[in-house]
Amino acid sequence: MSTQAETARRGSRFARTLPVLLVRAAHPRQAMLTALAMGAAAALAGRPLREIGLVAVTVLVGQAILGWDNDLVDRERDARHETPGKPVAAGLLETGTVWFTVLCAALLVVPLSVSAGVVAGGAYLLAVVVGLLGNRLLRGGVLSWLPWAVQFALYPAYLAYGGWDGQGSDTPPTVAMTVLAALLGVCVHVLRALPGLVPDHQDGLRHLPMRIALRTGAPRLLVLASVLTGVVVVAMLVVGQAVGLT
């Protein structure tokens, strides 16, 4: 066997190991981007390094839970459409293993969240619960944006009230920052839905991105959603500099 073939075989074997499969099923890109964005938001809010790290790790675990749950909920649809990068749907990862991993991650994310304070931790845990419900409810209809808006609207509260050992602020986030965060959630929902528009259309789903895409076309919707996302992010930076998080 050639060196190249042996390397490919070892790479394939490594890609099918349990840790790698679990990472692939956790929607790692979205999880990492969200964790880094929340960590950056904590840094811009003037939090010390240890609090930035706590925020990033907590959000990373919470996003992994949402990713695993999403793949569990969608395993039949993903298998039917042969969606790439879905080890649960492909039968490479047993559902019982993923459920056990979700349970372990839940036991981890609760103390991580509450360590930033009861109010802050409650806000983040509620955001995770909303995300879990969003995987099951409203996702196929015109109100598909609602769980995303609520989930993202809770993130400023997590940052505002959070602190090391619960020593955070007792001042709520500004209304402007909360509204902008909710708008960002809607934009992310649209961007995340775009790659799956074809199978969603085949399954008869009519969520908000689908309804807009049927009118504008997917390429134009991608441009519009990207521009709006950029505008919202800039607005959040401006508001953060002008009035702060709280």
Image: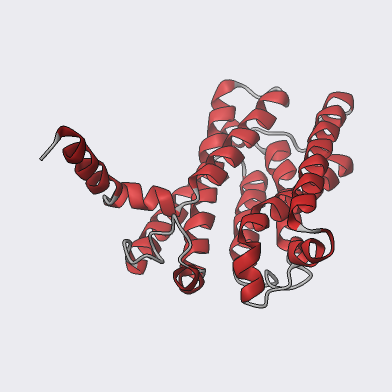
The one of 12 and 189 positioned closer to us in this rendering:
12
Name the outermost residue toward the left: 1
The N terminus lies in which quarter of the figure?
top left
In the displayed structure image, the side of residue 106 where residue 214 appears, left or right: right
Res 116 seen here:
no
Give the percent coordinates (x, y) of residue 209: 75, 61
Give the percent coordinates (x, y) of residue 173: 81, 40
Q: Quadrant of residue 148?
A: bottom right
In the displayed structure image, the side of residue 79 where residue 230 appears, left or right: right
The C terminus lies in which quarter of the figure?
top right
The one of 139 and 190 positioned closer to us in this rendering:
190
Give the percent coordinates (x, y) of residue 223: 78, 45
Residue 133, placed above or below residue 14: below
Q: Residue at x 42, y 50 (%)?
A: 24
Give the percent coordinates (x, y) of residue 2: 13, 36
Q: Residue at x 68, y 74 (%)?
A: 205
Res 69 seen here:
yes
Name the outermost residue toward the front: 2
The tally of labels here is: 0
In the displayed structure image, the side of residue 139 where residue 239 appears, left or right: right
Q: Residue at x 78, y 61 (%)?
A: 213
In the displayed structure image, the side of residue 147 where residue 71 appears, left or right: left
Residue 233, placed above or below residue 125: above
The one of 108 and 150 positioned closer to us in this rendering:
150
